[in-house]
Amino acid sequence: MASVADFAQAQAPVYHQERPAKSGLVDWLTTVDHKKIGILYGTAGVFWLLIGGLEALLFRLQLAKPDQDLFIGTQYNGLVTMHATTMVFLAVMPMIAGFSNYFVPLMIGARDVAFPRLNAFSWYTFLFGSLVINASIVFAHFPAGGWTGYAPLSTRAYGNDGMDFWWAGLVLLAISSMVAGVNFVVTILNMRAPGMTLMRVPVLAWMMLVIQFLLAFSFPPIAVGLIFLAFDRTFGAVFYETAMGGDPHLWQHLFWLFGHPEVYVLILPSMGIVSEVLPVFARRPLFGQHAVIFSGVFIGFVGFGVWGHHMFTAGMGPIADAVFAATTAVIAIPTGVKIFNWLGTLWGGKLTFPVAMLFAISFIPMFTIGGLSGVMHANAPLDLQQHDSYFVVAHFHYVLVGGALQGLFSGIYFYFPKITGKMLSEALGKAHFWLFLIGMNMTFWPMHDLGNRGMPRRIYTYPADAGWNFDNLLATAGVFFMAAGTLIMVYNMLNSLKNGKEAGRDPWDANTLEWMTTSPPPAHNFDFTPVVFSERPLFDHKHTEDLAIPVPSEAEQIHMPSPSWKPLVVATGALLIIVGLLLFNVAPLLWLVSVAGALTVVVGIYQWVSEPV
Amino acid sequence: MSAELATAPGHDAGHDDHGHVSAENNFLGLPNIKLAMWAFLGSECMFFGSLIGTYFFYHGKSLGGPLPTQVFSLTITSISTFLLLMSSMTMALAVDATRLRKLSQARAYILATAVLGATFVGFQIYEFSQFVSEGLKLQTSLFGSTFFVMTGFHGAHVTVGVIWLTMLSMLISNGKLNKDKASVTVEVAGLYWHFVDIVWIVIFTFVYLLEFIK
Amino acid sequence: MSYRLLTIRALRDRLARHPAGRVALSLLHVAVTAALPLLLLWLAGCSTEPAPRDTHSPVSDNGEISSFFYSLLLYLDAAILAIVVAVWAYALVKFKKQDGDDTLPEQSHGNMKLEVIWTAIPTLIVVAITVPMLVGVFKMSKRHDPNQPVVEVDVTGKQWWWEFDYKNGVGAGLHTANELHLPADTAITLHMTSADVIHAWWVPRLGGKRDANPGRTYPMSFTPKVPGIYDGQCAELCGSSHALMGTKLIVHPIAAEIEVEYKGQKVKIESYDSWVKAQQQPAKAPVAELEKGLKLFKERTCPSCHLINGLEGTDVAARSASSGPNLTHVGSRMGIAANTLVNNPENIAKWISKPSAVKPGAKMPDGLVTPEDAKTIAAFLSSLK
Ligand code: HEA
Ligand code: HEA
Ligand code: CUA
Ligand SMILES: [Cu+2]
């Protein structure tokens, strides 16, 4: 029986770059290596997670007791808006992008993504977008329109100056996501190793494929909505001007046509991670892999037809309400299929419980709680009571924190050894897990009750006699547990980088291609092009007698893409275009900055296409 | 097992950024760049779908004039539409020429396409200034906002196409785009160009023509 | 049948009475023990603090429909969750790897029959809850027959208070603010709209909310059933003082006055007709010691935004989007500044001397009056019952 160590014997092939990588900072600035870009995304994600969590901690302090005045009015609204914008766009999505960058090529046995430089461009537009949104607090105020930015509250007449940074940053993030979506669709469809048919693609990579489609197709509507907002705020267009006949529903439709697929963008990768982690620690294949994959695809499709469930109280009329309510309820079915298949994977396995597994198994009940309250919302007559109440806040934190975030935590503990070559401390990890699980339930469970007791969301203060005091106090207390847990995780990562145990290639005795190569993998990922015979290629290698290890042929000269400044240049051009539009509000002539940006983009692209790769 | 190996689809171990493409090396048998363009155009469908959708959502809801029928000039727009249609033809010829490895001929067609596209944009600028002088501005009404932003973004797409085609012809001139690479590269630019053209047909039919039929 | 929310305890007692219920309960116990921390918090969530805005103690037909679906789905969801968690917990305990056991378990890739079952059963459940739900949607959106006695009120949300214009039925022509008075057992239609951004009028005890959209009007029809005083507030983020955009619903008995409990106190509610009669009266001219208040009120430009019917020089304000609440009977309201403060002369004085200190961003300007003048004006305004 082969062991994974045998792969070390395969002699390392030469690889060749047109212009070899420099070292240090220049290397990180010019890198087009999907693994480095993945690390950049992931690090940024964890950083913004701390910031978004800090914002939550601050406004939870304000809500701890009735009638407080720590953060009032727009200060509070700004914190909530930035908390949600940060968590959704700057923490969870980049963490997902981190995993998808780092692992999708490894999982499908590719050397890089389809368009490495475009990938670096996505990273930079993301980075600039995140900075632009947060620059609001330096140059103006936090945007305070809620993460949903409903017009007309977000227009010039009612919204504060922070909204300009909000749309500008989101436009950059939208570009980043659409570009990345196209890039990864091509990567996953076209760059698979020989023998890796679609049905052998690991579930995580599959879910990434689904969300890339969602990104590519759901970001355009919000981009259009943001462009309208930008034109209204900057040039006096009247898209959201109700006095001119504008309709407040326009923004809502455009936003939720994006917003609902977006929530599946946030959850599907975590479901993919859970689908990778459970089989490894149950020592058996994922139960019903095809069902898990197809249900993910189905969720992606149906996800485009349910956006109206966020608008049951908006007055769309009973027919639209009925249609959206019915389509929404349907999503419970494929999601249930996933849950039951995970249970099927556990059933009859031989389970071990390292931290990655703990987060993966606690995902199941926590997400189910959130999903089931989602089914309550899908009931339009009931949602008239629950909409914009804390019941909704409870729903989406169970799916986002108990689901998406816990899944990503599981991924961090599972994949950290592969990325760094070092193991994380299990003891610290367990402390993180328990603190976080307890804190999360302590914070978000009482919110169901608050919703039932009629507490609306996004209120910065509440009267002492409404019966909301105890639940709110409890909710605030819980945040400290989550914060402690999260900080422990960060410490654990930093500490392991220095002091962690060596991980080796395959510390978990796992099944898929990424564990076949060294930890961390070499720049060219695999010394040889892997050939795949089932959905568990590494398992096959370890458990099949006559499966020879492919040896790199002499002819196999690997050509790796060269580092390049051009993605940074073009992204800077895009940033300048946006900044020029922002400056237009300050002095109209400053729109010339946009012109300079456009020129930078054109020249940058010309150099981009003419430089040898 | 060896049989399986033999039938396993080929695999491009490397990457292929702009230019480095070869149709055989990919799992779906479609060059990456072409697949990417199809995915991108799907995304663009949602983009223009949202813009055109908004135009219709707001159609007839403007509180004041000028109305579409008062500003639209079918003659002028028909001419510019015709030019854009012709540019699709020259684009198709350019793609054909690259396939036949006649690069200099292809370059001529590419430039012709770019010129036609630029003329279209010129017509659009003229049309816009005409509308403004007739009292329809971005700020005037829902019609003004939706019309200018929708057609403006279409015009921006044509402009991007013109720049792209110009770059292509430059790359051909200075030899950076050789005969092997050119075929796919130009074809992809062609996909984009035809798409932008089709979007215009949709806008011309539903926004301009329909206005006069009712 | 009452749709009141069952407490967890009551549910347990009910279940324990049936054998099948007892099985369900023991399942639940397995589930809950496995998720012990969760259980503690669940119970914590069901604390005994009174809930004056309970969404599931409905006082209207619409509220009953919502609450009915809540109970239905709560029990359904609890059952589904219990099954999932029970299987999960059982598997975690039963299939834990034994020390020293390094063999592979059976490498099953799935089971078609199971896939079909766990697709089909949820499908049936979804159909079973969707059909009544659709009925509910159309029931709640039905309009009252305008030939029947209907009270219709235009509800306009404004940053950050509510304006009510009675359009039809008893009380037609009234123009009030922040407190909505309605007759019990009468068909009501509210027409929701807004003068600036989106708001949502929500009184949890009454039932569901509706958005008040600028540039759009949307009706909400219902029949209030239980006389009483119910708190509510704006439920759609509408700017800096969204948290302080309160409202009250006072459901009056049709005939005689009755006594209800409100926040632990007994309060009398007159009949709807007598409330309407009182509101239809113009304001009485102030008695001598309050005349100074009226004079200051006129001097300090208050009438440019506020209307007082029947007092010369104060009933001229043109109603516009920027105007403030009608003050003709402001003394009769329970709260001021959209129920942010209890209505008494001190609070009125506090409010008018610096509104932005009470409500961040308030649309009524600061600095109109000195604190002394504010007291004088407040005494006068309080008298406007
Ligand atoms: C990760 C993110 C995520 C996920 C996965 C979901 C999943 C779901 N969501 Fe959620 N949702 C949000 C994030 C998410 N949501 C956010 C952020 C908001 C608020 C936005 C805002 O206003 O700011 C929101 C709001 C929201 C609303 C609007 C509420 C309101 O504002 O009034 C609705 C209404 O229908 C809804 C429904 C659902 C449903 C039906 C699902 C389903 O996909 C859930 C399916 C899962 C299950 C049902 C559990 C497992 C299934 C079984 C065990 C099978 C058996 C079950 C049955 C037969 C019922 N969500
Ligand atoms: C993925 C998305 C995501 C995540 C992970 C979270 C995480 C959390 N959320 Fe968030 N939340 C949203 C998405 C998310 N939220 C959205 C979309 C809204 C709607 C906004 C709107 O209405 O517009 C919302 C709204 C929202 C509200 C409602 C506010 C209101 O309506 O007024 C509340 C209230 O408690 C809340 C709380 C929390 C808490 C306590 C966490 C916790 O899980 C956070 C845990 C803490 C951490 C993970 C980090 C802790 C670390 C530190 C504190 C140390 C910092 C130190 C350094 C920087 C050195 N959130
Ligand atoms: Cu009005 Cu919130
Ligand atoms: Cu949704």
Image: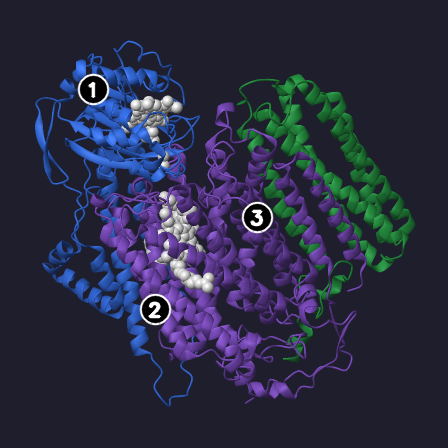
- Quick one: SS at disc 1? loop
Callout 1 amino acid: Leu
Image vertical order of residue B9 relative to residue C189, above or below: below
Q: Which mark is residue A435?
A: 2
Mark 3 and mark 1 residues within 8 Å of each other at the beta carbon: no
Q: Residue sitting at 41 percent across and 42 percent down?
A: A310
Q: Nearer the viewer, mark 3 or mark 1?
A: 1
Is label 2 on the same chain as label 3?
Answer: yes
- Quick one: SS at disc 3? helix
The subunit letter for the residue under badge 1 reads C
Left or right of residue C367: residue A543 = right
| Front residue (pair C52, C88) | C52
- Residue that label 1 marks: C384
- Residue C154, quarter of picture: top left
Nearer-N-terminus badge (2/3): 3
Q: Which mark is residue A169?
A: 3
- Quick one: SS at disc 2? helix
Left or right of residue C270: residue A158 = right
Callout 3 amino acid: Gly
Label 1 CA crowd tier, 10 Å (few <14, some 14–19, many 20+): some
| Front residue (pair A396, A65) | A65
Confirm or reject: label 3 Cβ below 8 Å from ligand 2.
Answer: no
The subunit letter for the residue under badge 3 reads A
Viewer can see residue A581: yes
> In the rendering, at what x and y percent does residue A398 appear?
36, 57
Q: Which mark is residue C111?
A: none
Query: Alpha carbon of mark 3 to alpha carbon of mark 1: how far?
Result: 52 Å
Left or right of residue B76: residue C156 = left
Q: Which chain is blue?
A: C
Q: Which chain is purple?
A: A
> In the rendering, at what x and y percent does residue C381 appear?
23, 22
Image vertical order of residue B161 relative to residue A93, above or below: above
